[in-house]
């Protein structure tokens, strides 16, 4: 399979602390690649570097063969890298549809026009509806975003990311704070999306990661100590010693 994202020897230091330490990883076209590790392993810093919010001290990031190591967040978004955050970032007083239309408008690079004209623009609301259909929120299109449940807000945030037409989705702890039922719905959503998008999933919910991932990279102190299929990671003794333990649930 084609490598859409390549991380080569990434290093980011904060004083004596190496948040990423000679980290290399590849993401294949259409795969869901899980990134796991204990607290302080460097997972969020790694996602920040992929998104362009933090620049590495050393190493390279290649997207579809192009070097994007020094590209801005906006440039990466236009190239096709979409990002969702640990904390929802929606406009709660706007409708669900309005939120996604704003994302479509941002992708198109158009100026923010008078709101009534925006609502009648098919080039905005048709892609927005399509993104909502992808995350099963079409029926909630005209609800106030702030009235959604927490899990639905995360679905809306993913819809806003999809509206940017990404090729790679960077998902940072999307299930944080969710109930078991909400997490189960999100797992089913991500299962449908993978294949259509390449997904990098940073997540503490091990059941979700092992259920969804095609491959998993394990970070410890900013270093990738293992990469493989869920079964290979479950059976890796170094991973067990450093993170998972010997519990049979893994």
Image (tube, rainbow, N blue to C red):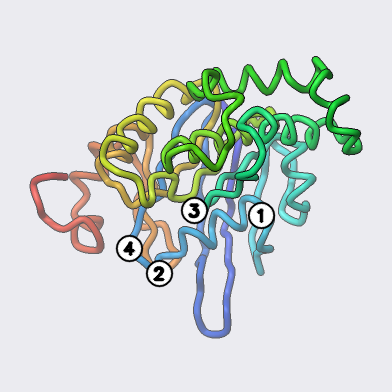
Mark in front: 1 vs 4: 4
Tally of numbered tags: 4
Using the image, tell me which numbered label, if any, was put on residue 86: 3
Q: Secondary structure at mark 1?
A: strand
Q: Is residue 222 above or below residue 207?
A: below
Which numbered disc covers residue 60?
Answer: 1
Residue 40: which numbered mark, if any?
2
In the rendered image, the vertical position of residue 152 relative to residue 51, given as above or below: above
The picture places residue 187, in percent across and down from the top left corner, at 35, 32
Instruction: Find residue 174 and report its horizontal and vertical position in percent.
Output: 44, 45
Q: Disc 2 to disc 1, how far (Cα)?
A: 22 Å
Q: Is residue 83 above or below residue 141?
A: below
Is disc 4 placed on a helix, strand or loop?
loop
Q: Judging from the image, what secondary structure is the residue with disc 3 in? A: loop
> Decide: marks 4, 2 in contact (CB < 8 A)?
yes
Q: Nearer the viewer, residue 211 or 130?
A: 130
Quarter of the image where the C terminus is located: top left
> Quick one: label 2, few (<14), some, or many (20+) residues within 10 Å?
few
Q: CA distance from mark 2 to mark 3?
A: 15 Å
């Amino acid at each position: 399979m084609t490598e859409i994202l390549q991380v080569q020897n990434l290093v980011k230091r904060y004083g004596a602390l190496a948040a990423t330490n000679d980290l290399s990883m590849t993401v294949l076209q259409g795969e869901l690649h899980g990134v796991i590790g204990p607290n302080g392993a460097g997972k969020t810093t790694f996602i920040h570097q992929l998104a362009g919010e933090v620049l590495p001290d050393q190493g390279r990031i290649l997207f579809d063969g192009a070097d994007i190591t020094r590209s801005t967040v906006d440039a990466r978004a236009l190239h096709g890298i979409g990002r969702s955050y640990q904390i929802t970032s929606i406009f709660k007083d706007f409708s669900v549809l309005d939120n996604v239309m704003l994302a479509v408008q941002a992708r198109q690079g158009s100026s923010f026009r008078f709101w009534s004209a925006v609502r009648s623009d098919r080039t905005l609301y048709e892609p927005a509806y399509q993104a909502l259909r992808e995350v099963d929120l079409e029926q909630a299109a005209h609800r106030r975003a702030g009235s959604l449940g927490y899990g639905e807000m995360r679905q809306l945030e993913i819809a806003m990311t999809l509206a940017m037409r990404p090729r790679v989705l960077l998902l940072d702890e999307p299930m944080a704070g969710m109930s078991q039922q909400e997490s189960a719905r999100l797992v089913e959503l991500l299962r449908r999306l993978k294949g259509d998008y390449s997904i990098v999933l940073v997540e503490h919910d091990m059941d979700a990661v092992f259920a969804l991932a095609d491959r998993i990279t394990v970070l410890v102190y900013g270093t990738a100590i293992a990469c493989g299929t869920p079964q290979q990671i479950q059976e890796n003794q170094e991973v067990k010693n450093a993170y998972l333990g010997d519990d049979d649930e893994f």
